[in-house]
Image: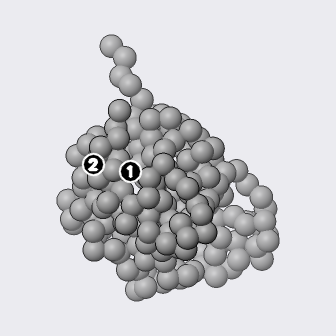
Amino acid sequence: MTERAARAVFLDRDGTLIEDVGYLERVGRIAMYPWSIDAIRVLNRAGLRVVVTTNQAGVARGYFTEALVEEIHRDIDARVVAGGARIDAYYYCPHHPDGSVPAYSRSCDCRKPGRGLVDRAVRELGVDPARSFVVGDRRLDVQLASAVNARSVLVRTGYGVTEEAQGLKADAVADNLMDAAGWILRNLT
Ligand SMILES: [Mg+2]
Ligand SMILES: [Zn+2]
């Protein structure tokens, strides 16, 4: 018996799952959108893996550490679990070519729109990108979807309204993550 590869929703963090407050450098500044946990639960029930994929160049710039990024993800995860939902993985890119911390100051293949974080989900979670979705508020999220042959949903939270006004096109444009989850469920073919 062969099982089809898993579908995933590659979920941007800042401006999509939580409010984009600029460089998020402490747990106390996390502001989850009120619909986010319900949206994740909807995706869980549809059998989709939910994978946070986020560029965290603040690590390369020396604004915060990887340990802080991981602490923030643990805090988000505790809220998600308490709400009866599940995020399957949190993948982030700590690099930037113009960083100030030598260990992270380089070009890489995991900074979106590079496909490295998606490839990691292929290896670790058995995800098929071509049956998957990318949800985000920035051009680089839509570009990531194109790069891996997934479908893109631009949300009008974070920078999404600005990106849409500047002519960014995606497979769908949704008011927020809950609206995006609804579109995904209607387009699972
Ligand atoms: Mg974003
Ligand atoms: Zn990277």
Instruction: Identify which residue is drawn at 48% across, 44% down.
Output: 151
Secondary element under disc 2, as helix, strand or loop, is: helix
Secondary element under disc 1, as helix, strand or loop, is: strand
Q: Which residue is mark 2?
A: 44
Instruction: Identify which residue is drawn at 55% across, 70% down.
Output: 165
Question: Could you say where residue 162 lies in the image, as x and y percent from the top left?
Answer: 55, 74
Query: Mark 2, residues whose alpha carbon is within 10 Å: few (<14), some, or many (≥20)?
Result: some
Question: Could you say where residue 141 lies in the image, as x and y percent from the top left?
Answer: 56, 57
Q: Amino acid at mark 2?
A: Asn
Residue 47 vertical position relative to residue 156 in the rendered view, above or below? above
Question: Could you say where residue 34 lies in the image, as x and y percent from the top left?
Answer: 28, 74
Earlier-in-chain disc, 1 versus 2: 2
Q: What colour-coding does the image apply?
A: one colour
Instruction: Check residue 50 in the rendering and tell me which mark sits there, or answer none.
Output: 1
* Front residue of 78 and 151: 151
Residue that extends furthest to the top in the rendered view of this protein: 1
Q: Is residue 84 left or right of residue 86?
A: left
Answer whether residue 151 is visible to the viewer in this image. Answer: yes
Mark 1 in CB contact with mark 2 (< 8 angstroms): yes
Question: Could you say where residue 185 lies in the image, as x and y percent from the top left?
Answer: 29, 45
